[in-house]
Amino acid sequence: MSGIKTCLWVRTTPAEVADYYKSIFPNVEVSDVNPMTAQLVLEGQPFMILAGNPGHAFNDAVSFVIDCKDQAEVDHYWDKLTANGGAESMCAWCKDKYGVSWQVVPQALMRFIGDPDRTKADRAVQAMLKMKKIIVADLEAAFNGAA
């Protein structure tokens, strides 16, 4: 087997989608663009963009998780993905303008909710459940009992 890649079946041109992701993510390599497909490697993950999605929409059953090192990365990806027809959801989830679901997750979130002190971790979970975009400072305040 030569590998597995994700195929995104879109209602627009593959070149448009590839350009969109290139405008958001710093590490995107695009190759073999034609009217039906585009091949790209997005942050090390191979994707094929395929034109021809007239009756099938993306849904939340599949999402892509962006592991963000800090609030600045969360803000960048959240703001870019939800702009121009994207949509916010709850608990770090959003959709881009094509309807693809993303989870924009700061590393701090996983650290806080996975903490062995379940009281602190539960406070972080409760704070997260009230958020759309994750705000690390607010999550940390809840974790530490200051919120």
Image: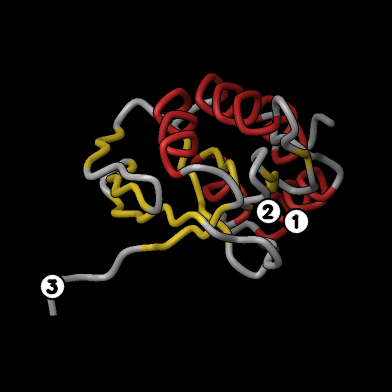
C-alpha span from label 1 to label 3: 43 Å
26 with respect to 1 (left or right): right
Q: Residue furthest toward the front?
A: 35
Q: Residues within 10 Å of mark 1 (few under 14, many from 20)?
A: some
- N-terminal-most mark, 2 or 3: 3
Mark 3 residue crowding within 10 angstroms, few (<14) / some (14–19) / many (20+): few
Query: Who is closer to the viewer here, 8 or 92?
Result: 8
Q: Quadrant of the N terminus?
A: bottom left
C-alpha separation, residue under disc 2 versus residue under disc 1? 4 Å
Percent position of residue 75, x then y: 61, 23
- Front residue of 121/6: it is 6
Q: From the image, state whether disc 1 or disc 3 is nearer to you.
A: 3
Q: Say which quadrant the C terminus sits in.
A: top right
Mark 2 lies on residue = 121
Query: Counting other residues with Cα less than 10 Å from the Cα at mark 2, is it few (<14), some (14-19), or many (20 or more)?
Result: many
Instruction: Find numbered disc 1 in the image and state the secondary structure of the residue it sits on.
Output: helix
Residue 113: quarter of image: bottom right
Query: Residue 88: where, in percent of width, then height?
Result: 78, 39
Q: What SS does tag 2 mark?
A: helix
Q: Amino acid at mark 3?
A: Ser
Task: Say if 139 sits above or below 1 in the image.
Answer: above
Dot 3: element: loop
Name the residue type under label 1. Asp
Return the residue at label 3.
2
> Mark number for residue 133?
none
Q: Residue placed at 45% from the left, 23% from the top?
A: 23
Residue wearing tag 1: 122
Q: Nearer the viewer, residue 102 or 115?
A: 102
